[in-house]
Image: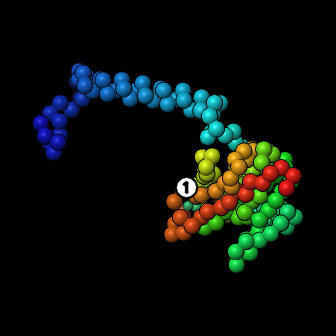
Amino acid sequence: MSTIQPPSETIWWKQPLDRVEFTWILIALTWSIIMFIMMPLWHVYGKQNLSNEAYRTTPAAFMKKAQAMVDEYTVRTETDQKIPVVHPPPGSDVYLVARLWSWWPLLELEKDQTYRLHISSMDWQHGFSLQPVNINTQIVPGYEMVLTVTPDTDIDQTIICNEFCGIGHHNMVGKIYVTEAGQ
Ligand code: CUA
């Protein structure tokens, strides 16, 4: 039998199972069950898979809320492009806009304080990846993802896009400055 010719025995599912084939099926099945159990376990015992919520929105409606937060809580701007750095009060709703190719605005959050972080995309699919804590979620237009976050690092956190979104994908970098509480 060759791979070019059709199999001589066309009713292949009535053929006896080879021992090697059976072994591989068993390995794959066992591994998939382990992964299946690990998913909820990681959620409970790990830090990567956060509880999140998703709501329908539109780019315009989301932008309006983000703009209102930026207007109220901007503490300074950075670079020649005057990118706002926003310091919202602890416990508040924080809005982060994903678009080609930036995360807007830059955020300044207080250590060990909890915020509701809303993220949505203005255009295409992006991936929110928070380093070094390794929190990942997909960001799609028309949906508002809400993560409950409590910054607990002593260093600033970097947001990178982990969903390929075109020529400027590698430049799509954002920032969460982590400050001591009350500052
Ligand atoms: Cu946005 Cu890659």
151 sits to left or right of 168: right
Q: Quadrant of residue 99?
A: bottom right
Q: Position of residue 32 (x, y in %)?
A: 45, 29
Q: Identify the residue at image location x=77%, y=58%.
A: 108
Image quarter hosting the N terminus: top left
- Camera-nearest residue between 72 and 109: 109
Identify which amino acid the numbered label 1 is placed on. Answer: Asn
- Camera-nearest residue between 137 and 15: 137
Residue 84 seen anywhere in this rendered image of the structure? yes
- Camera-nearest residue between 64 and 163: 163
39 sits to left or right of 174: left
Q: Identify the residue at image location x=57%, y=67%.
A: 171
* Mark 1: C-beta under 8 Å from nearest atom of ligand 1: yes
Q: Which residue lies under the disc numbered 1?
A: 162
Decide: is 109 above or below 82: above
Residue 57 seen anywhere in this rendered image of the structure? no
